[in-house]
Image (tube, rainbow, N blue to C red):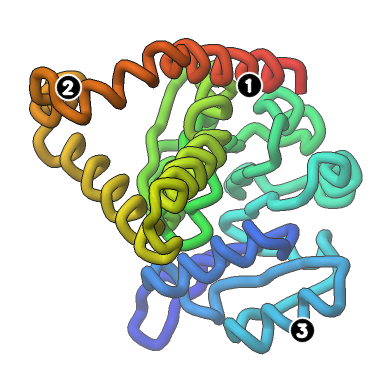
Amino acid sequence: MKTRGSTGKKKMKIVFIGGGAMGEAMVRCLLTKKVASPQDIVVSDISPVRRELLSREYGVSTLDDNRKAVTSADLIILAVKPQNLPEVMEKIKGLAPEQLVLSIVAGATLSSLCQGLNHSSVIRAMPNMPAQIGEGMTIWTATTETERKQKELAQTVLRALGKEIYVTEEKYLDMATALSGSGPAYVFLFIEALVDAGVHIGLPRNVAQELVIQTILGSAFTVEKTGKHPADLRNMVTSPGGTTTEALLQLEKGRFRSLLLKAVAAAYKKAKRL
């Protein structure tokens, strides 16, 4: 498993099963944040094109044999499509007890992972799309058999993707799927609509887009840094009888809050069925 470099420091071998968009993003973030070096990482992928790209761009080792790839791995990250997971688990079944598996496969529960792998040290994580640039939000949980040091390793890896939240109950991952998982799509739609509104009233599209993006970034940071309730901050922007009041009235008439609630509830219902 762990080997020692010239400095005597223990080195960790991280193996990715799947080198698609999210797998590549994790590799990039681990290297950028200096959590791992290229020689610590192996990526196994069936596509020769992906293997060549990952090797060329990041200097990591690549293989087309999952079983061979996981040999002596400390951390195995499952980053494959859900439909390919059963075959992958069957191939790598028989891992050593001290090897840790971290799955980012959508819909794959801890019980299904443990059963499919015949392995108990398993973590299930759900990063969202902004993790691809190191600004993601990841929620994760682990089996009771997963040791504290293994959880610390997983936390270090997931923090390279942005922020992370550990929960003891797996049910919260389905809920988070509807909020932080699908959430970027809601925000992108909101950005798109605001930019279009700016164009509608006469702003050049590039100006409208810059105004909207910075407004959303600044507003989010204000909530985070002040710790104030969003309603209190909204009231600070809303002058009696002013333009903001008129705009908010139209949003309330259109049931903006209700639509968001229904959208998240529908996404959660769908997530539970996956």
Choose the circle earlier in sequence order: 3 or 1: 3
Estimate how packed mark 1 is, as few (under 14), some (14 to 19) or many (20 or more) residues with alpha carbons within 10 Å.
Answer: many
Residue at (54% x, 74% y) in the render: 40
Of callouts 3 and 2, which one flags the residue occurring earlier in the amino acid sequence? 3
Judged left or right of residue 253, residue 101 is: right
- Mark 2 element type: loop
Residue to which mark 2 is pinned: 229
Looking at the image, which residue is at 42% across and 66% down? Answer: 206
> Can you identify the residue that label 1 sits on?
267
Q: Amino acid at mark 2?
A: His
Residue 5 placement (x, y as % from top left): 43, 82
Determine which residue is flagged by label 3.
52
The span from disc 3 to disc 2 (Cα, nearest Å) is 49 Å
Q: Quadrant of the N terminus?
A: bottom right
Give the quarter of the figure containing the C terminus: top right
Picture layout, residue 104 above or below residue 25: above
Residue 125 in picture, x, y percent from top left: 55, 38
Taking depth in this image into account, of 124 and 118 the one nearest to the observer is: 124
162 relative position to 25: left or right: left
Inter-mark Cα distance, 1 to 2:
25 Å
The earlier-in-sequence mark between 1 and 2 is: 2
Of 55 and 271, the residue lying toward us? 271
